[in-house]
Image (cartoon, rainbow, N blue to C red):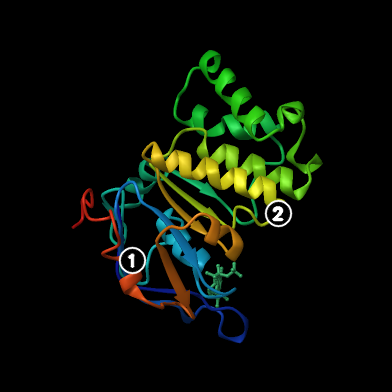
Amino acid sequence: MIRFEAVGLRYPGGGPHRGAWGPEALSDITFALPRGSFTWLLGASGAGKSSVLRLMHLALRPTRGEVEVLGLRVARAPRAALPPVRRRIGVVFQDFRLLPYLSVFDNVALPLRLAGRAEASLRADVAEMLRWVGLEAKAQSSPLELSGGEQQRIAIARAVIHRPELLVADEPTGNLDTRQARRLLALLREMNRLGTTVVVASHDEELVARFPAPSLFLHEGRLHDPDNARGLDGWAEDDELA
Ligand SMILES: Nc1ncnc2c1ncn2[C@@H]1O[C@H](COP(=O)(O)OP(=O)(O)OP(=O)(O)O)[C@@H](O)[C@H]1O
């Protein structure tokens, strides 16, 4: 489902060295996550969590090594091969990335429309998702009129509405209160139970302790304990990459 093999990632450098590459943000990252798994991605600020997630949802390609996601080997795949795979992935961005010129309803409906769902059939699904995140009354608002926590709930609704095969979430509880954070985690665990592979980056130790699951721990761009990612109970049975 997801495989990283000796992955390195550099960002383009800025400042006086414009045009050159910066230092490696990720080095020698190797792990495999089976289909249907739930994984926490942990580590201090700057450890590389967002970078790993960007590689997982095909926003970036590795500078070295290989990343395989949903059967696609990303490193040398032709550009045209990426969008169809991206559409099978739900992403909750740390900074939400809601489209300000669309209403809340249209933001959440977007993945269904991109997938070609008929207008008549998607309205009920969007309304139900908005009810679930408690924002049905804001359906016609602009995202700019919402609080940070409300925007986060809309970003989550948009990421899960099309039941993606893979869901990656970058600090999805950062702007939520404790009750909402637990509710969100319960939703993600339920989606996982129904078959979605889920990867969640988080700083929230209390939440991680409350929903125990295998974790990948990053430290300064390296996987701290690669053994954490392998051989955990119940992982081997449906690991298509094993
Ligand atoms: N767009 C970028 N351009 C250049 N360097 C970047 C970029 N994004 C991240 N980096 C660098 O890559 C390293 C890892 O950053 P990353 O955002 O992946 O960490 P993180 O663990 O997600 O941190 P946080 O929890 O604070 O979001 C950092 O040294 C950071 O400065």
Residue, x 26% and y 49% (percent of image)?
Answer: 71
Judged from this view, the residue extending furthest toward the bottom is: 16
Judged from this view, the residue extending furthest toward the left is: 242
Expressed as whole percent of the image width and height from the top left, the position of residue 116 reads 45, 24
- For the residues labelled 2 and 1, the Cα–Cα distance comes to 28 Å
**Kind of residue sitting beneath label 1:** Ala
Residue, x 37% and y 67% (percent of image)?
Answer: 62
Mark 2 Cα shell of 10 Å, populated few (<14), some (14-19), many (≥20): some
Mark 1 Cα shell of 10 Å, populated few (<14), some (14-19), many (≥20): some
Residue located beneath label 2 in the image = 175
Position of 156 compared to 11: left or right?
right
34 or 108: nearer the viewer: 34
Expressed as whole percent of the image width and height from the top left, the position of residue 199 reads 45, 54
Look at the numbered disc 1 and give the secondary structure of its residue.
helix
The answer to whether 142 is drawn above or below residue 33 in the figure is above
Name the quadrant containing residue 102: top right
Q: Ligand 1 quadrant?
A: bottom right
Which numbered disc covers residue 229? Answer: 1
Expressed as whole percent of the image width and height from the top left, the position of residue 44 reads 57, 75
**Kind of residue sitting beneath label 2:** Asn
Residue, x 42% and y 64% (percent of image)?
Answer: 215
Residue 209 visible to the viewer? yes
Look at the numbered disc 2 and give the secondary structure of its residue.
loop
Which numbered disc covers residue 208? Answer: none
Residue 29 visible to the viewer? no
Residue, x 45% and y 71% (percent of image)?
Answer: 217
82 or 80: nearer the viewer: 82
Name the quadrant containing residue 196: top left
Expressed as whole percent of the image width and height from the top left, the position of residue 203 reads 59, 66
